[in-house]
Image (tube, rainbow, N blue to C red):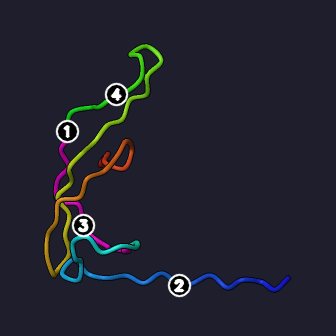
């Protein structure tokens, strides 16, 4: 079996983002601020799972966007 070569990631800038474009985009941005949105849970309440959502203001030299994160992604250290 031949080895499969991994593709190198392609990074884009904020101004190159387009709504509803399928596929993954790799960005290098600076987090300006992060705000926890209402925690959301599902299940029966006792054994239910909890998900925390945060809205983060992020950007680079070309623009700024609001990025929604889940759980630990939105924690600023």
State which mark lies toward you, 3 or 1: 1
* Res. 26 mark: none
Inter-mark Cα distance, 4 to 1: 13 Å
Of all residues shown, which one is farthest toward the top?
46
Residue at the image point whose x is 38% and y is 29% from the top: 50
Query: Of the residues under marks 1 and 2, which one precedes in the sequence?
Result: 2
Q: Is residue 73 above or below residue 6?
A: above
Inter-mark Cα distance, 3 to 1: 20 Å
Residue underneath mark 4: 41
Residue underneath mark 2: 8
* Res. 30 mark: 3
Residue at the image point whose x is 37% and y is 27% from the top: 42
Crowd tier of the residue under label 2, counting other residues whose Cα lies within 10 Å: few below 14, some 14–19, many 20 or above: few
- Residue 9 magenta-drawn? no
Of all residues shown, which one is farthest toward the right?
1
Residue at the image point whose x is 43% and y is 22% from the top: 48
Q: Quadrant of the N terminus?
A: bottom right
Query: Of the residues under marks 2 and 4, which one precedes in the sequence?
Result: 2
Crowd tier of the residue under label 3, counting other residues whose Cα lies within 10 Å: few below 14, some 14–19, many 20 or above: few
Query: Of the residues under marks 3 and 4, which one precedes in the sequence?
Result: 3
Residue 20 location, x and y as percent?
Answer: 26, 70
């Amino acid at each position: 079996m031949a080895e499969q070569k991994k593709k190198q990631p392609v990074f884009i800038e904020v101004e190159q983002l387009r709504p509803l474009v399928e596929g993954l985009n790799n960005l290098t941005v600076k987090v300006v601020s992060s705000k926890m949105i209402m925690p959301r849970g599902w299940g029966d309440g006792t054994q239910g799972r909890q998900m925390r959502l945060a809205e983060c203001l992020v950007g680079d030299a070309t623009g700024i966007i609001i990025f929604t994160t889940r759980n630990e992604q939105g924690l600023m250290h």
